[in-house]
Amino acid sequence: MKKNKQGCDLQTCMLCRLCLPAWRPAIGTHHQHFSLKKGELLFREGDEVKGIYFVYSGSFKVHKHWGKEKELIVRFAQQGDIVGHRGMGHEMIYPVSATALEPATVCYIDLPFFQTSLQVNHDFLYELMLFYAKELQESEMKMRNLAHMSVKGRIAYALLLLHRKFGTNGDGALHLQLSRQDLAAYAGTTYETVIRVMSELMQEGTITLRGKEITVKHMEKLQQLVQEDEL
């Protein structure tokens, strides 16, 4: 991770968008700007929490160990999102890792200033509370899916979430080039199973594949696969 002297525009991240206008100069004084390469760790599971990160550009996967050699992707973060907040609590240890999926930049706010920002900026505190509640709901849904949903249903659900989170590019493909291994880690399955199921979805005309690009051709078919497992 390399320190970036360019700085941010004080408008992109969640804190800057929701803080009081008079608080932005204080953010400009206290924040630091870092650049990361694709595949570089932002923080590691088990590290001590010393601050909070906001994604200024690029995207990240937030993941944790699942068994001895497996990982489970908990969520993805893109421009404007907060990262590292899961470490705030009694022990102040990151329970997850965050890795850049592409060249990315982040704004870093040290913990004391972040906590002061929460006390001063009530709109930001309220939105952060709603964000935590949404994350909890999604985590509970993910655990339910891992326990009760078929593998094909989980992969369909993962593709729907990625479509909702990142949208599509000019060619209609998901605006995130994700490896099959990362898709497997997000859906809670194996690389080999993802290859098989994606091949089935392609033969059925539900998706098309070109390298790492995934294009959803029939959204309703993915939704039907999820609904069938929920019955």
Image (spheres, grey):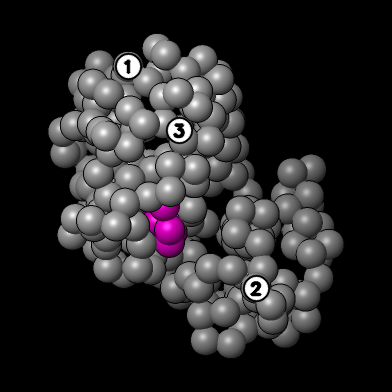
Amino acid bearing label 2: Asn
Residue at 41% from the left image edge and 31% from the top image edge:
24
Q: Which residue is mark 3?
A: 15
Q: Earlier in the sequence, mark 3 or mark 1?
A: 3
Question: Crowdedness of circle 1 by 10 Å Cα count: few (<14), some, many (20+)?
Answer: few
Residues at marks 3 and 2, CA–CA distance in whole angstroms:
27 Å
Q: Earlier in the sequence, mark 3 or mark 2?
A: 3
Residues at marks 2 and 1, CA–CA distance in whole angstroms:
39 Å
Q: Nearer the viewer, mark 2 or mark 1?
A: 1
Residue at 23% from the left image edge and 56% from the top image edge:
5
Residue at 29% from the left image edge and 57% from the top image edge:
6
Numbered tag placed on residue 169 in the rendering: 2
Q: Nearer the viewer, residue 206 or 2?
A: 2
Residue 128's spot in the image, x, y percent?
A: 50, 26
> What kind of element bears circle 3?
helix
Q: Main secondary structure of the magenta part?
A: strand
Amino acid bearing label 1: Thr
Q: Which residues are magenta?
A: 56-62
Numbered tag placed on residue 116 in the rendering: 1
Q: Are marks 2 and 1 in contact (CB under 8 Å)?
A: no
Question: Crowdedness of circle 3 by 10 Å Cα count: few (<14), some, many (20+)?
Answer: many
Q: Is residue 165 magenta?
A: no
Amino acid bearing label 3: Leu
Residue at 58% from the left image edge and 87% from the top image edge:
210
Residue 68's spot in the image, x, y percent?
A: 23, 53
Q: Earlier in the sequence, mark 2 or mark 1?
A: 1
Residues at marks 3 and 1, CA–CA distance in whole angstroms:
12 Å
